[in-house]
Structures are given as structure tokens and as C-alpha cells.
Image (spheres, helix red, strand yellow):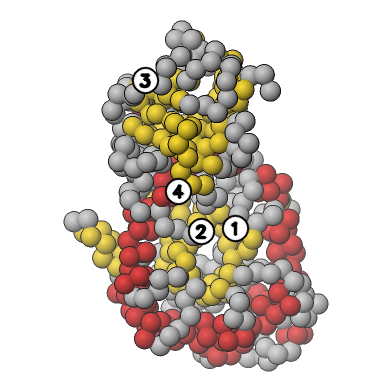
Amino acid sequence: MGDSCALGNMAVVTGAAGGWLDKLSWLLGLRSVIAFGGMLLSLALSGGAEPQPGTTLRVDFARTNGVIRALHGLNKGPLAAGGLIDVIAAQRGLAVPLIRLHDCHWPNPDVVDLHAVFPNFSADPAVATNYDFVRTDEYLAATRQTGAKIVYRLGESIEHTATKRFIHPPADPAHWAQICLGVIRHYNEGWANGFRHDIRYWEIWNEPENRPAMWSGTDEDYFRLYCVAARAIKDRYPGLKVGGPAVGASGHFSEGVFRPTAFVTNFLARCRREAVPLDFFSWHCYTADPTEPGRRARAIRQLLDAHGFLSTEIHLNEWNYLPGDSWAPLARTAEPAARQRYHEEMAGAPGAAFITAVLLDLQDAPVDAANLFHGELGGFGLFNEHGVAQPNFHALRAFRELLRTPQRVEVQGGDRNRVFAVAGLNPTGTEAGILLATLAATNSETRLAAVHLPWNGMTRVETHRVDQAHSFSLADLSTNAPGAVEVALPGNGPAVIFLRLHPAAR
């Protein structure tokens, strides 16, 4: 697979390396410019003219190219604030494909984590009364109400306190593995008054290289735990998928070459040498560069293949926007006001545009699943502490609308540093969708030409926008004469823009 950010070099353009907040104003009409809500809109009969390189995106609905993939998974289920607030309906409305259960009810996790469901580690894992499933049962039931499938992380949540309680290597990995099997039996086989949830993905621990916050042991301690647990799960349940190691540090790029960490290299070598099951390899990426997750995915695919894991899935199961590419504003010594600005940028229009850009860029990357961190309340989340949806939530709403037109069509041209775009058609060819992300303000303008629409006659164009002033609200509604639609986009700030096109007479 090529670099999906290289606009004009691929059949379908899904990304650009920077953010083209620069150039977006809307041309919807008959070559007459309409001022509307701070955007210039006009529609034109372009006659399918070839775009000027670097200044125009050309969406050709006569040329299809695969299917738009639902990669907008989340971390954390919809129950928050000790069950006081739930965002079940909001998550369900996004049609989230996959929810990973990690850091649930954090910073006081009382669900999912093994210490929460099996509080006495020395007890017998074969005895049902040694488990406390009550709270976790409720949490998983709410998660299933969203319609999403589940990735169950077996292990513990992160601990930032000086005293660590649960992130230590189990004294007996085989005993720990038996506890995991008890959890699987409960949720998949109905054991211990349980359920048949058919949870397929079981992940062993989280960020074991992130020390001391997530693991107090050595690399070898984790390798041993993974080998024992992965074998135990696959021996008992060969149809399930087991994986890890959910690394936060997978490696770095040096002069264009990906250099994996010693932890990753040794983990893969160990699994290969000892024939340990690795159905999916999970990793994390927090960055300010929306092309980095895709670049890492391609590098990790090559790394897995080189170690013989040709069929191992790739799960980017934690990712989000990292303003300024820095964790410093989240440090204990950071100024509160700086921390607040950081989270506001992450959840606001810049974060919304970034999330959209990544989801579009990943369409051409070798990832099988992706899970934004996270879909709950507070910092890094889609909702504020009261449960109010933020702009980053509305970015996922826009992506959900794009998925209603899943037949991907060709997008060419543009400026690789400024615009991310993907377009599609619905199965009946009666509706088209175009989703764009703009990441930085400039004084330049980008024109989008939509040609070869699969209907004759007038076209109705709905323009929705997510920015500081719009929450995926309708910014314009126009009916246009037959022909290709042209849109001029102003570069006046980070934004997510979705165009819905359909015959005016329907």
C-alpha cells in the first residue's frame, strides 16, 4: 500500500501531511458566489474540466475504488461517573464498530480489571464464588447496547500514583491465566450466571513497556506472562483471537527508516521462536501529525511480515491528537491554565479536524482495527464532565455520515500539506458523500470539483460543518443546475466539512 497522504500520487486521495484549513470556502451555485455563514458558496457547471494541480481536488464518481472502512472504534464503554451518566445513545448513534475496555471508570477502576473481578488472587479460579462480576456485568451490558463489538483487555488500568497496587507481574502466570479463562467462560459461555457475548478479542495487558505507570516488572516478566496466557487461551478457545502487547512505544523513524524498540523486536522474536499465538498486534500513537499513524501502520506491517506473522492483525487501539506533539502540559508541574487550553484544543475544532484527517488517512493503511482514546467523559474524551458532546464527537458524527455512502470513489489533486478528503456513493447510487478535514488557517483557497455524478438533472447539496461555531450543523443547503459541482473552500481555521449530494427531485 502506498502513502495515502500523497495527494495526486494515488488513485484515491485520503490525506495530506499537514492541514489545509487553508483553502476552504464553499462554491455551490451557478458560478455565482454566495456569502453564507462566513463561507463563500457557489455552484458551477464545470463541464468536468481537469483541475489545476495543487489547487483543486477532483472527485470522480465514475471511478470507484473499494469500500470506506469503519475504523472509528473507541476505548471505554458508555457508563461514567459511577453509573450516574451514560452516553449509550450517543455512542450508538456513531455506529461504533469496536470498543476496547481499558482504563474503564478511571481513575478508580472498579470494573474490567482483573483485581476488580477476582479480588483475592490466591483463591481458586475454578470456583465461581471467588469472582465479583456484578459491576463489570453492568458495564459490559451498557457497552453492548451501543451495538459495538468488544475488545476485553485482560490486566489492569494505568496507575500514576507513587504507590502502585495492581500493575505488578503476577507471581504465578499460570494461575493468572486460569483467572483469565474464568472471565472468558463467564462472558462467552454463561458460566457463573454469565452471558454469551461472543467476545472475540482478548488482549493481554496494556503498555508493559510504560514503566512504572503500567508495569513494575522486566521485559522478560511480560514475555513470560504473555506466552503462558496466550497459550492457555488458545488451547481452551482456539476460535478466539488473543494478542498484545498494546505498546505505547513501538519505535521511531530515523532518516525515513522505522526502528522498532528492543521490546517490540524481542517480543516478536520470542513469539516466533516459541510458536506463541499472536492473532493481533496492538500499539498506540499520540501525535500532532495526522499521517504518523498510517506511516507507523505500514512499518509495523512490514515488521510483522519479516518475523513471519503474515496473518496477524494490526490494531491501533489507542490514538488521539497530541497538541504541540508534547505531553508537557499534562505533567503534575504544569500550569492549570495550560492544561485546560491543551484539553480544549484536543476536544475542540483542532482535535476534530485531526481525528477526521487520521480516519481518512488510515483508509489506505494496513490497520484492521483502530480505537480512539477515548469515548467517555473528561480529558481525551468525546464529552465534557457533564456528558455534553464536544467538537471531536461531532467529527465522528461526520465520519459516520460518510459511511452511509460506503462505495469509495476516486479523489485526485490538491495540496498534500493541506487537505484530507474521501468521497463515496451509497449502494443505489442515489446519494454521494464527501468528507474533508482542514487543519490550519491560510489565506489560500482550494477548489473541489465533483464530476460524473450518477444521476441527471438538478443536484441538492447539503453542507455540514464542525468547527468552533458549528456542531455538525447545516451550514448551507442549495439546489444546483445539472453538471459538476464545484466548491471553493476558505482557509479560515480548523474544520470538518461534510457534503451530502443527491438528486433534487427525490
Q: Earlier in the sequence, mark 4 or mark 1?
A: 1
Q: Determine if residue 106 is in view.
A: no
User: In the structure shown, which secondary structural element does the residue marked by tag 1 occupy?
Assistant: strand
- Mark 3 = which residue? 49
| Label 4 vs label 3, nearer the camera | 3
Q: Secondary structure at mark 4?
A: helix
Q: Earlier in the sequence, mark 4 or mark 3?
A: 3
Give the distance between the C-alpha atoms of the residues marked 4 and 1, in whole angstroms.
16 Å
Residue type indicated by callout 2? Ala
Mark 1 neighbour density, 10 Å: few (under 14) some (14–19) many (20 or more): many
Look at the numbered discs 1 and 2 and tell me whether their residues touch, using CB distance below 8 Å: yes
Badge 2 marks a residue whose secondary structure is strand
Q: Residue 469's x, y, as percent?
A: 54, 26
Kindly report which numbered mark, 4 or 1, lies closer to the viewer in this rendering: 4
- Residue 363, disc: 4
Residue furthest to the top in view is: 32
Q: Residue, x 71% and y 59% (percent of image)?
A: 144
The residue located at (52%, 56%) in the rendering is 371
Q: Which badge, 2 or 4, is on the more N-terminal residue?
A: 4
Q: Quadrant of residue 212?
A: bottom left
Residue 365 versus residue 119 in the image, above or below = above
User: Residue 414, image x and y in percent?
Assistant: 33, 31
Which residue is denoted by mark 2 in the rendering? Answer: 369
Dot 2 or dot 3, earlier in sequence: 3
The residue nearer to you, when weighing 132 against 196, is 196
Q: Amino acid at mark 3?
A: Ala
Residue pushed farthest right? 193
Task: Name the residue at 57% across, 46% down.
Answer: 382
The residue to which callout 1 is attached is 98
Quarter of image, res 488: top left
Callouts 4 and 3 close, C-beta under 8 Å = no
